[in-house]
Image: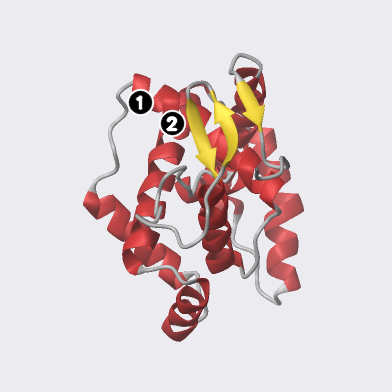
Amino acid sequence: MRCQIAAAAICLALALTAGRASSQEVVDRIVAKVESDIILMSDVRELARYQSFLDGKSQSDAEILDRLIDQWIVRSEANVARFPQPSGEEVNRSIERLKRAFASPEEYEARKNQSGLTDEEIRQFMKSQLYLSNYLDSRFRPVIQIDEKAIEDFYKTRVIPRAESRGQTPPSLENARDFIQEALVQRAINEQADKWLKESRSRVRIEILLNEKVQ
């Protein structure tokens, strides 16, 4: 579920510098300045490749840049707080969950080859994604409270219709309670994170250079 934080709130499954190639065949350029740091066109292209690997398509350059700026904000605060990096074991578990999200191992390999990503690049993206999502989880989860009515409403409007649409017998409310509780917590974390990021952007110096012509 932690992986979903980043997907719904800021698409935190991704790093500003993860997977950056050591050399570039094309001329790179700065597409944004955030405080004293820069975001390069290569960062945008690499995130586009990762999105294509995950979903078969990617967002526009402007949308990807927006995500990278959000990631910078989260990473900066996490670094200041000295938030720990995910363990190798945690990264391995997340990669295994990612593989199971594909229809088959063959589809996973085919999508990976199509995107041009290596196993190590995917691992670095996953590690960075976990770092950001774990930090957001630790920051917002303690203040979130889910009441019984919210759980019951989710059960009636989401769990039962979904099961019936698949021709399945819905689980009992008690059996589904833990799943519903976590789903609602994750949604609340996403909402809190989104609000915090919007407020944080107003306090950060950001200069967008994406559409400027290369001299």
- Residue 143 placement (x, y as % from top left): 51, 21
Left or right: 173 with respect to 78?
Answer: right
Label 1 and label 2: CA atoms lie apart by 6 Å
Q: Which residue is mark 1?
A: 79
Left or right: 58 with respect to 16?
Answer: right
- Residue 11 placement (x, y as % from top left): 57, 46
Q: Is residue 179 visible?
A: no
Q: Please name whichever residue, 74 or 114, is drawn nearer the observer in this view of the structure.
A: 114
- For label 1, the SS is helix
Q: Which residue is mark 2?
A: 75
Label count reads 2
Q: Residue at x 44, y 58 (%)?
A: 24
User: From the image, which quarter does the C terminus lie in?
Assistant: top right
Q: Amino acid at mark 2?
A: Arg
- Residue 4 placement (x, y as % from top left): 53, 49
Q: Residue at x 48, y 82 (%)?
A: 110
Q: Are marks 1 and 2 in contact (CB under 8 Å)?
A: yes
Q: Please name whichever residue, 77 or 38, is drawn nearer the observer in this view of the structure.
A: 38
